Image (tube, grey):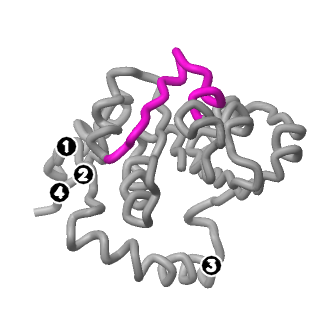
Amino acid sequence: MAVTGATSGIGLIGIQVAKALGAMTVICTTRSQDRARLLRHAGADVVIVTWTQLVSQALLDATGGRGVDVVFDHVGGQILASCLPGIRDGGSVINIGRLGRGLIDLDALSYRHLILRGVLFGLEPPDQIGDVIAALTGDVISAVPDGRTRPVIDAVFPFDQANDAIARVRGGSPDGKVVLAMS
């Protein structure tokens, strides 16, 4: 499995959920070598630095040429497009992020028989959200008490320091979630 834009809060928990569900190898992308440590700490087995490596080739190299089964894409655009040749025949892409705009090569999608699914959390119909939560109750929820999944917290700010918390997030480099604590 691969997670693009993996240093996001959703990406960090996605790494852990993939491991809890039995993924043998989790490959993650980041734009910065400095963030590789964070990804490895969250459970990534392979880290691809997108500014220095060709994503599709790195995915193929990490899987012995086979390609990954699933890409959980938080970025979209060119990063999503560059993943397609690195996915195994019949594999899947789940896109949740739309940070980048770009075109995808429909031949890369079609010739590999890939499944592409877009997800828009927060705007899904309530019955679909319920189905997702119900599906999590087995393997994923049980991974919380035993520590296989845990929130990655960068910083905790008292509620009266909300402006400082926002500045931390806008700075663009928190190592996990920034939390506001209510007294």
The answer to the question of whether label 4 and label 2 lie on touching residues, with beta carbons closer than 8 A, is yes
Residue at label 1? 155
Image location of residue 30, percent across then percent down: 46, 30
Reading the image, the residue beneath label 3 is 128
Mark 1 or 4: in front is 1
Identified at 57% across, 50% down, the residue is: 72
The answer to whether 155 is drawn above or below residue 146 in the figure is above
Amino acid on which the number 4 mark rests in the picture: Ala
Q: Amino acid at mark 1?
A: Ala
In the current view of this chain or complex, which residue is farthest to the left? 183
Residue at 59% over, 80% down? 126
Boundaries of the magenta span: 43-59
Q: Name the N-terminal-most of marks 1 and 4.
A: 1
Q: Which mark is residue 179?
A: 2
Q: CA distance from mark 4 to mark 3?
A: 31 Å
Residue toward you, 136 or 161: 136
